[in-house]
Image (cartoon, grey):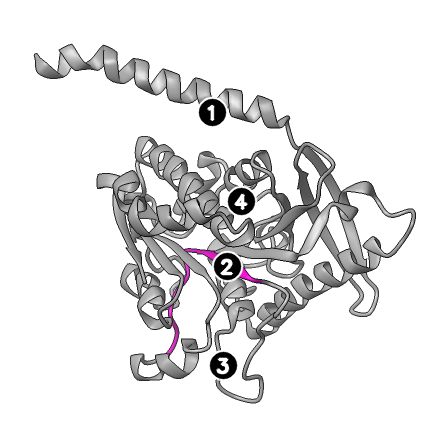
């Protein structure tokens, strides 16, 4: 009976919150969405991009999103839309060779086997170079008198890199993860903050200080309690969460959502997430749709606070990450900061 008595109040509070969010979005104006291709002539590589341009004419920070294996520039929509509505210019980069061409085109094997062919060191290096090219091309465009107006609005002194799964691997490489062999570091100094959705640690634990000890910039890991081994590479929910533990202290954050599977963090349509769960054999241990919607709402909240803290130098957002984030996430997940 007590729950029934409180239900109208809770419903009204949710409706008011939703109305406030809608008003905030309208106040900012709907972001402009641009699909285009940029050609890297030096590499003979054409990159499909989706650009979300916030309302206004002022200079704004840049957020780059890298999709997971078999994805496209449509990935990360849930995150990119939210960030753009709150004053960030967002570029979703599609990476040829590890994108949806793996499973859409002709080829032998199951969809999962075809996806696995894109998870190579060569493709990883290509992805890192894709991001460097995008930053280089923005610099070139800004120097041109006839460049598109949206390129002029980007503040290249305030750039964040984000990505899901293989895109999280790309993000970690650009954040300063070190590798064995001749290529020791792929860190990109032009990027000052990082968000990795479904990241994972590599190598033996005793190697982690060497591998992850140079990742000094602000970093947020977003994962879930059932964010497991979707491609048979040995990733587990534990070693995805362990990225936070392996990194040096200093502006590092982690959220682990209860019942969060791998695909829910891609930020795409929930139907696409269900398809990926089936392809990778995770359908029997997938995030329930109602839980997925809650995870999406909480992820929008914490990622925006992180970006505000480190790209807009918002002192209140920095305090929120330290003192209020755990309460805001509540029973839906576990928050850590160091």
Tell me which label, 2 or 1, sits earlier in the chain: 1
Drawn side of residue 203 relative to residue 130, left or right? left
Magenta span contains residue 200? yes
Q: Residues within 10 Å of mark 3 (few under 14, many from 20)?
A: some
Instruction: Label 2: state its secondary structure.
Output: strand
Drawn side of residue 70 relative to residue 287, left or right? right
Instruction: Label 3: state its secondary structure.
Output: loop
Q: Measuring 49% from the left and 36% from the top, which residue is drawn there?
A: 269
Instruction: Return the residue at label 4.
Output: 76
> Where residue 12 sits in the image (x, y, percent)?
31, 13
Cα–Cα span, label 4 and label 1:
20 Å
Regarding residue 74, the answer to whether it shows in the image is: yes
Cα–Cα span, label 2 and label 3:
18 Å
> Where residue 270 sits in the image (x, y, percent)?
44, 35
Mark 2 and 1 residues: CB-CB less than 8 Å, in contact? no
- Residue interval drawn in magenta: 192-203
Tell me which label, 2 or 3, sits earlier in the chain: 3
> Where residue 163 sits in the image (x, y, percent)?
52, 55
Image quadrant in which you'd find residue 77: top right
Tell me which label, 4 or 3, sits earlier in the chain: 4
Instruction: Return the residue at label 2.
Output: 194
Mark 4 and 3 residues: CB-CB less than 8 Å, in contact? no
Instruction: Label 4: state its secondary structure.
Output: loop
Instruction: Return the residue at label 3.
Output: 179
Mark 4 and 1 residues: CB-CB less than 8 Å, in contact? no
> Where residue 250 sits in the image (x, y, percent)?
38, 66
Where the N terminus falls, by quadrant? top left
Instruction: Return the residue at label 1.
Output: 21
Where the C terminus falls, by quadrant? bottom left
Image quadrant in which you'd find residue 294: top left
Cα–Cα span, label 3 and label 1:
43 Å
């Amino acid at each position: 009976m007590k729950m029934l008595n409180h239900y109208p109040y809770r419903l009204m509070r949710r409706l008011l919150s939703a109305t406030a969010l809608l008003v905030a979005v309208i106040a900012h104006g709907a972001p402009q969405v641009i699909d285009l291709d940029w050609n890297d002539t030096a590499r003979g590589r054409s990159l499909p991009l989706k650009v979300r341009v916030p309302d206004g004419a002022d200079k704004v920070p840049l957020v780059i999103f890298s999709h997971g294996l078999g994805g496209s520039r449509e990935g990360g929509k849930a995150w990119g839309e939210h960030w753009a509505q709150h004053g960030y210019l967002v570029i979703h980069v599609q990476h040829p060779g590890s994108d949806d061409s793996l499973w859409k085109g002709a080829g032998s094997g199951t969809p999962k086997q075809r996806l696995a062919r894109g998870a190579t060191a060569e493709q990883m290096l290509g992805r890192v170079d894709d991001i460097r090219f995008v930053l280089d091309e923005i610099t070139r465009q800004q120097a041109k008198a006839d460049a598109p107006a949206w390129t002029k609005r980007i503040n290249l002194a305030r750039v964040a890199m984000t990505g899901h799964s293989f895109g999280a691997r790309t993000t970690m490489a650009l954040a300063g993860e070190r590798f064995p062999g001749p290529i020791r570091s792929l860190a990109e100094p032009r990027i000052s903050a990082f968000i990795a959705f479904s990241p994972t640690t590599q190598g033996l634990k005793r190697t982690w200080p060497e591998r992850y000890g140079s990742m000094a910039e602000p970093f947020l890991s977003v994962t879930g309690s059932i964010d497991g081994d979707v491609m048979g590479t040995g990733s587990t929910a534990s070693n995805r969460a362990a990225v936070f533990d392996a990194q040096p202290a200093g502006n590092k954050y982690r959220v682990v959502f209860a019942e969060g599977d791998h695909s829910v963090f891609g930020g795409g349509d929930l139907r696409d997430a269900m398809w990926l769960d089936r392809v990778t054999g995770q359908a029997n241990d997938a995030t329930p749709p109602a839980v997925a919607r809650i995870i999406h709402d909480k992820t929008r909240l914490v990622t925006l606070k992180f970006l505000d803290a480190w790209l807009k130098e918002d002192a209140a957002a920095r305090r929120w990450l330290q003192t209020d984030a755990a309460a805001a996430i509540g029973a839906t997940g576990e928050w850590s900061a160091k």
